[in-house]
Amino acid sequence: MAHFAKINEQNKVLTVNKVNDSDAPTEAAGQAFLERVHNWPAHLWIQTSYNTLENTHRLGGTPFRGNYASLRSTWDPENQIFWRAQPYPSWTKDIPNAKWQSPLGPRPSLTEEQESQNQANTHGWVYEWDEDAYQADNSTGWVLTNTRA
């Protein structure tokens, strides 16, 4: 099965359709097929890979277009990437990894003690992004939270 995202002129993903491989041996053939069936312009159907997330193919294959298209995601024709919605205003695109990046870098790691407490189910330590804290002091943003408290 091939998957195609139906996008609008603003590059917003409206839906994703499955197409039999026989109807879409190439992207252009799939686009033409979908235009005939759905009466939606061929250039607004973009092929996507069900197995691609953050520019990694989950089965070890070649990643395709950064991420699998989904509702509320956006097509970036310049970088050939489907982007999920921006999680926070301060986050920017990490194009090589097809994901949003906080201005302070990746989520901090938990300590061994925190991991041990999580595994024992006595705590639920997790770092969460606090946009208000970042806007007030751009040296902060990742906040350690106990979700079991």
Image (tube, helix red, strand yellow):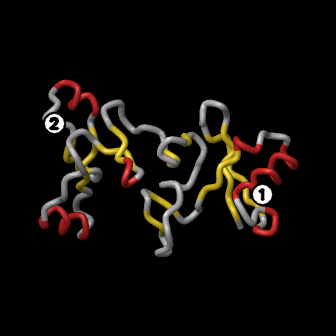
Expressed as whole percent of the image width and height from the top left, the position of residue 149 reads: 25, 49
Q: Residues within 10 Å of mark 2 (few under 14, many from 20)?
A: some
Residue drawn at (20%, 65%), measured in percent from left and top? 115
Q: CA distance from mark 2 to mark 1?
A: 50 Å
Residue drawn at (27%, 65%), measured in percent from left and top? 121
Residue drawn at (28%, 32%), measured in percent from left and top? 131
Residue drawn at (54%, 65%), measured in percent from left and top? 51
Q: Nearer the viewer, residue 12 or 28?
A: 28
Of the residues shown, which amino acid type is indicated by label 1?
Answer: Ala
Expressed as whole percent of the image width and height from the top left, the position of residue 28 reads: 73, 54
Expressed as whole percent of the image width and height from the top left, the position of residue 29 reads: 77, 57
Q: Mark 2: which secondary structure?
A: loop
Q: Residues within 10 Å of mark 1 (few under 14, many from 20)?
A: some
Residue 51 tag number: none
Q: Nearer the viewer, residue 4 or 80?
A: 80
Query: Which residue is most to the top?
Result: 136
Q: Which residue is mark 2?
A: 140
Q: Nearer the viewer, residue 98 or 116?
A: 98
| Quadrant in the rendering for residue 123 | bottom left
Q: Nearer the viewer, residue 101 or 27?
A: 27
- 22 left or right, relative to 115: right
113 w.r.t. 105: above or below: below
Residue 29 tag number: 1
Q: Mark 1: which secondary structure?
A: helix
110 w.r.t. 43: above or below: below
Camera-side mark, 2 or 1: 1
Q: Quadrant of the N terminus?
A: bottom right
22 w.r.t. 146: above or below: below
- 127 left or right, relative to 89: left
Precedes in sequence: disc 2 or disc 1? 1
Confirm or deny contact between disc 2 and disc 1 (CB under 8 A). no
Of the residues shown, which amino acid type is indicated by label 2?
Answer: Thr
